[in-house]
Image: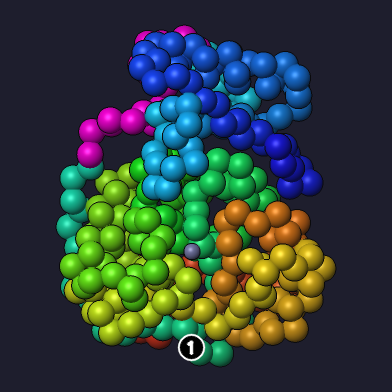
Amino acid sequence: MRGNGFIRVAALALAVPAGTAPGAQNALAARAVEAAYRAFPDLAEVDVTLWRAGQRAAPASAPLLTLSVPAAARAHVARALGQGTYTRVWRAGAAPVALAPTRPAAPTSVFWRGSGPMRTVALTFDDAPHPLYTPLLLDLLRRAGVRATFFVIGRGAEHYPYFVQDLVRAGHLVGNHSYAHRPLRALPPAEVRRELARTSALLGALTSQPVTVFRPPGGGLSPAVRQAAAAQGLSTVMWSQNPGDYLGRTPGQLQRAFVQQLRPGQIVLLHDNVDATLQALPAMIRAAQAQGYAFETVDAMRPDAATLAGTARP
Ligand SMILES: [Zn+2]
């Protein structure tokens, strides 16, 4: 369970024996949701991930069932799950998505920062979605009126599709962060192409928008990775500011690093699943806004964005 200073969210991981029927999975998940809300009536959302017993520790394993239950859905989730009408749910074996069309590579296929004199900054969150942190982050950004960019791991998008849709509905930009978050430089080119294509297809199907931006896991760029992205119509987006939120820094350290390094056109590397980032974010946003900065998604920071004005943005 975590909070963001405004709301609290609980993420439950449950294990069931192999062979547990879908109906029994639904019933167990609904009971767990109800128990969580009864124990903590102030929760804004309860998210559940159901695993087959012993499976969670296995690398690259997939859950059996995931669901997200905002407080407003608490009363009807059990019935809706039973009737198959609940929308914030994913189940193993769900139909695979069709490959979304790609479009020609952008003129500038790799960029690290925006250009021009405008006081704009782009926050980017890697490794989304996460059943505990994504709803809390979305809530904070909504309160601050800030749009950001989320680089989504395909496997996570597959298992938590409703969070990807939440991101887009809230006006954020969703980018490709590979399917399994493996170091792409170490993979054969064909495998790199599959990692990217599978993720773009998933995201495109979930959001009904073509995916245009990509960030390699760990920032690992090579000519083959760059080429695979460009061939699939993806601009590779790196970063020009790295407060180091994956290094165990405190919220105060992150905020100071962010403010000290703040410059127009910056693309800031952050992560979707870090406590300190969640805690530092409101103060970071306030500090930037006090200096006259506006927050943009990374597609507006492309060096060639001016030539795309009016066509690239919804
Ligand atoms: Zn990553």
Residue drawn at x 72%, y 41% is: 2
On whether residue 183 falls in the magenta region, the answer is no
In this rendering, position of residue 40 left or right of residue 245? right
Q: How many marks?
A: 1
Residue 112, position as x, y percentages in the image: 47, 83
Quadrant containing the N terminus in the rendered view: top right
Residue drawn at x 43%, y 11% is: 24
Classed neighbour count for the residue bearing mark 1: other residues with Cα under 10 Å, few (<14), some (14–19), many (≥20): some
Segment colored magenta: 78-96
Query: On the image, which quarter does residue 284 sit in?
Result: bottom right
Quadrant containing the C terminus in the rendered view: bottom left
Secondary structure category for the residue under label 1: loop
- 185 and 158: which is toward the camera: 185
Q: Which residue is mark 1?
A: 115
Above-or-below relation of 30 to 270: above
Q: How is the image coloured?
A: rainbow
* Residue type, numbered disc 1: Ser
On whether residue 80 falls in the magenta region, the answer is yes
- 125 and 122: which is toward the camera: 125
Above-or-below relation of 50 to 146: above
Above-or-below relation of 119 to 217: below
In this rendering, position of residue 211 left or right of residue 262? left
Residue 192 in view (yes/no): yes
Residue 141, position as x, y percentages in the image: 63, 54
Residue drawn at x 18%, y 45% is: 98
Residue 187, position as x, y percentages in the image: 28, 70
Residue 299 in view (yes/no): no
